[in-house]
Image (spheres, rainbow, N blue to C red):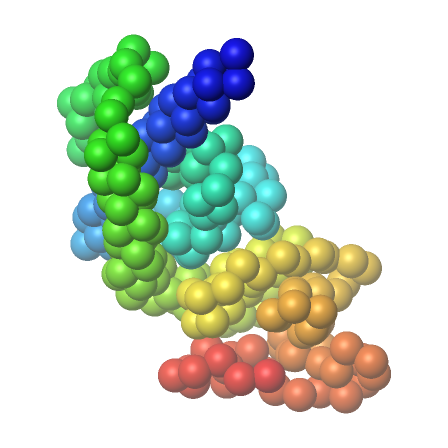
Amino acid sequence: MKIFCVLTTFFLVLVLADIKSDILGICIKMVSKSNIKIEKASNYNNENGNGLEYAITRIVYGGWYSIDELNCMITVPEYVDTDSIKTIQNSIRMQKNLQKDIDFILGVSFFDAENKKVGKMVKLIEERRFRTTQQLKTSIFHASTKIQRLEPLGEARRRFVEKALKNIIARKLAENEAMDKMICYLIALWISTKTVLKTPAEYKRGDCIIEYKTDHNIQYRSIQDKIWQVDVNDNDIQIKELTVQLQEEYFRV
């Protein structure tokens, strides 16, 4: 009985590791496809202006996603809890949503055939049988390799997204738009591209409060038709105008 339990546990570990490895592979593939779509949107222009800028604006202002979802979807796709199959699957879902949203907003589609292939891969995973001990070792190795491959994909994406967000925010500032929830989210996403961090944000009574690193907040508010970073403890202290920050190579607080 003990031997049976040990074998059962072993095979369960084998299957879970194998499934996780394959799902990570799908996640990487979806992030890569989103990157291609983002680059194409960045080079696409129509009556609405730049495709990527227009798509990001519509996605953010559509109110379809939380700031955490927008971070994972757009700015830091490599932030995936690789110990959780559910979290990896959610990351895949967010990348699919991004691709569909860009298609819907711009009226173009690049990946219909490829998405069908991904669906077939998922079905194969569900039908897969138990593997040998050597295959378990191989799966764990590949899982580790795949995690590392997400980082350069995130870096490559941010080259396009950071520029798009910077241009979107600059236009809002040029139009003297006051701080609101959507501009707050845009600022948080832009900071995410500069810091490679998730940037939880909250818009509260005219103030945009963004979590910068752990337990450290930064704050923005409108002051005389301009948006300023202000001291979180004393909002009367103006630190730096957002227009100036947009022109700086590195984000500093």
Can you say whether 34 is above or below 23 in the image? below
Examine the image and state in which quarter residue 218 appears. bottom right
In the shown orientation, is residue 98 left or right of residue 59? Answer: left
Looking at the image, which is closer to me, 122 or 131? Answer: 131
Residue 117, quarter of picture: top left
Nearer the observer, 250 or 49: 250
Name the residue located 46 percent from the left edge and 78 percent from the top edge.
246
Residue 101 visible in this rendered orientation of the protein: no
Who's the residue at 60% across and 43% down the image? 66
Residue 7 appears anywhere in the view: yes
State the residue at coordinates (82%, 80%): 233
Q: Residue at x 44, y 71 (%)?
A: 194
Q: Is residue 235 left or right of residue 64?
A: right
- Give the left or right position of residue 86, taking residue 224 as reference: left
- Where in the figure is residue 157, as x and y percent of width and height? 30, 57
| Rendered location of residue 53, percent (x, y) | 36, 54
* Viewer-closest of 78 and 66: 78
In the image, taking residue 102 as reference, residue 213 lies left or right, namely right
- In the image, residue 22 lies at what x, y percent? 29, 32
> How many circles with numbers are drawn on the protein?
0
Q: Is residue 98 above or below residue 243?
A: above
In the picture, the quarter occupied by the C terminus is bottom right
* Relative depth, front residue between 207 and 195: 195
182 lies above or below 34: below
Residue 17 coordinates in the image, percent (x, y)? 37, 33
In which quarter of the view is residue 118 placed?
A: top left
